Amino acid sequence: MMAADQTVDGVPPSLSAKVVGSFAYLTVRDRLPTILTKVIDTIHRNKNKFFEEYGEEGIQAEKQTIGLLSKMRNELQTDKPVLALTDTLQDAEYWNQYLQKQQKLQGDEESVSWFKSPWLYVECYMYRRVQEALWLNPPISDYDVFNEGKTQSFFESQQAMMALCTYLEGINKNMEDLSKNQLLEHFNKLLQVSLWGNKCDLSISAGQDNSQKTSPIDSLNSLQPFILVNDSNMVWSTLISAQRPGQSEKTTAVRVDIVLDNAGFELFTDLVLADFLVSSGLAHEVHFHGKSIPWFVSDVTANDFQWTIQQTMAANHKWMSKNGVQWKSHLKEGVWFYHDHRFWTQPHEFCDMAMDAPDLYATLQGADLLLFKGDLNYRKLTGDRDWDYTVGFSTALQGFGPAPLCSLRTLKANVQVGLQPGQGEKLGSQDPDWMTSGKYAVIQFYGSKSEQKD
Ligand SMILES: O=P(O)(O)OC[C@@]1(O)O[C@H](CO)[C@@H](O)[C@@H]1O
Ligand SMILES: [Mn+2]
């Protein structure tokens, strides 16, 4: 792990709330406390439910959890030192070692704290402390404080989901007759639908609804100018070159891994893309990677994943329910797989994965293509560091590259690399919050080491 606040060997410092007025600063000062307040309100609103389910113990658990969360909110708002975790969750020790490493990096003159330490660390730490508060109160330990927002996002995007399923049915029905160009056209559309599905994240909106209201296919053309880097052609050629006429399906199975981001509409767009990858024969296996605990308000957990497929099966829409049945079968038949390694809910930059989670790194090396969804994954791919806009994506990855990878990300944090000279400055003059509004996006690809472009 690199030193947090200095440029070493060309690697710039980590983004941090110590830069007053920066997006990190505004997030830690304003948005994180807002999210915590909503979590506290959600728990309080469910007090009767806890009483009905757990009696007096449920009331106690509600009270104590709120107490712990309020204490953390105060620590955050008054920039108190970051505290070691005290729960017995499997990775508590891991987090505490990471805290010690942060302390060493910062030196002893100042404590590891919310406004002084790397933004990526303190923001991830907050969500892990929410989990600690629940974990320390067993009757409600597995309560997902973000569940209401995630299910609401799903229910409020029904029109868009039905439109997508109708579009997918149209493709699947004529799959054999499609030319390669038609296949490519559908691929590009569904890749971009998955890309823009990332706008629907509840962390940036601090929990405010931002479900998808309109048909996602119809709006693609108007959204083209907002894609700042578009390496779709590299993604396509990676998939095409992975097609190997082999003796048996298993030995030549083309595998795509999707590192998921948000539940609700975004997850639905990812499932539609994965369905197309399999039904077109571009891939034979799709591995989904979700989060092992509730994370960044709307990120996908195993419950969300299963619930979404269940809801799709039960939909009162012919093509939607047909898709749900197909997706359930993909999971049952070993065509689709769901994983949730704990590394995805730790604060690491991805360049640390090979060292800190070699098992996960080895798993990802088995893929022909990795799709990383969303902004937080982009921040981790690039180390959440203050890179110049024109630095190459491969440089910012700092050696991370288990397989050819592509980030599908709408910009919601002020880290962006791989732009053309002047592109970032021009955007800044036209649109001051271009890096954080979610209005712009990238489809940014990095091949294996041999294909390093810059
Ligand atoms: O990863 P996602 O869901 O696309 O976005 C996560 C996010 O909303 O949370 C952080 C700010 O609080 C930023 O990384 C980003 O704005
Ligand atoms: Mn997210």
Image (cartoon, rainbow, N blue to C red):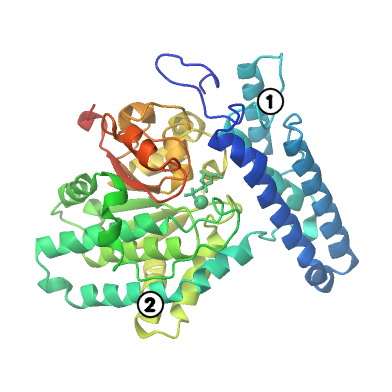
The residue wearing badge 1 is 112
Horizontal side, residue 365 vs residue 247: left or right: right
Which one is nearer the viewer's eye here, 283 or 30?
30
Spot the residue most to the right.
Answer: 56
Earlier in the chain: of badge 1 and badge 2, it is: 1
Depicted 251 relative to depicted 12: above or below: below
Q: CA distance from mark 1 to mark 2?
A: 48 Å
Residue 317 location, x and y as percent?
40, 84
Mark 1 residue element: loop
Horizontal side, residue 138 vs residue 439: left or right: right
Residue 343 location, x and y as percent?
53, 41
The residue wearing badge 2 is 162
Mark 2 residue element: helix
Residue 187 location, x and y as percent?
23, 60
Please, what is the three-letter code of the amino acid marked with disc 2?
Answer: Met
Mark 1 Cα shell of 10 Å, populated few (<14), some (14-19), many (≥20): many
Residue drawn 80% across the image and 68% down it: 50
Q: Examine the rendering and report whether any part of residue 187 can be seen.
A: yes
